[in-house]
Image: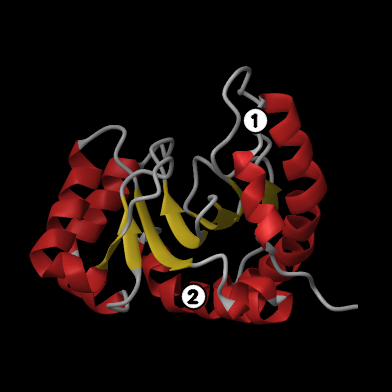
Amino acid sequence: MSVKGFTSLDFETFKIEGLDERMTAIAERIRPKFQEIGDILATDLSVLTGKEMFLHIAKHARRTVNPPKDTWLAICDNKRGYKQHPHFQLGLFDDHLFIWLAFIYELPNKQAIASNFLHHQNQVSKLIPKDYVISLDHTKKDATTINTLGKHGLADSLQRFHDVKKAELLVGRHLSPHHDIVQNGEALIQFARETYEKLLPLYKLSYQE
């Protein structure tokens, strides 16, 4: 049986009014696909990283009023949770699919990781393909390509990641809901795998002293 990709109906989930209604649609439409895709990617990342990687699927448990604007799967080397660790994401907003290597503000050693990236700025700049995008806030859709940022813009982003408590660093790729890869599960897994493989040196750098 082939792996299912994401359809226009999945992206329309984020237009459903009401917390309970949208959460039900996420659970029924999207999470089963996350489970299937995430299990495969977690196995792939275990091989790529050389350590056991665990799948986590966003629960949005803290929400009591506002329905989530996006949802995602996350993969990291900790079984209990992912937010305090560098992790790999795949998820949906209403207008795009995102594939990230994510360093979010809950990281207890965020400043140390940022300092390491700043110390190796030239290396970081060479590690990330120019058509990849960067975001400094996982709750927002905005992202800028490395090519558009340029070397100085990347340096500014890394500095903000270091200096601002709530600043984050997410590096990866976006795909339109209408892209053939998004709708083809096997192709999407391969695309995500290739993305993570390209970002693996940056992931490993984040663990260096």
The residue type indicated by label 2 comes to Thr
Can you give x and y, in whole percent of width and height, for residue 84 in the image? 49, 40
The residue type indicated by label 1 comes to Glu
| Label placed on residue 17 | 1
- Depth check, mark 2 against mark 1: the one in front is 1
Q: Which corner quadrant of the image does residue 193 belong to?
A: bottom right
What SS does tag 2 mark? helix
Let me know if residue 135 appears in the view.
yes
Can you give x and y, in whole percent of width and height, for residue 136 in the image? 31, 47
What SS does tag 1 mark? loop
Is residue 96 depicted above or below 106 in this figure?
A: below
Placement of the N terminus among the 4 image quadrants: bottom right
Can you give x and y, in whole percent of width and height, for residue 71 in the image? 60, 45
Can you give x and y, in whole percent of width and height, for residue 162 in the image? 22, 44
Residue at 45% across / 60% down in the picture?
A: 101
Circle 2 packing at 10 Å, graded few (<14), some (14-19), many (20+), is: many
| Label placed on residue 195 | 2
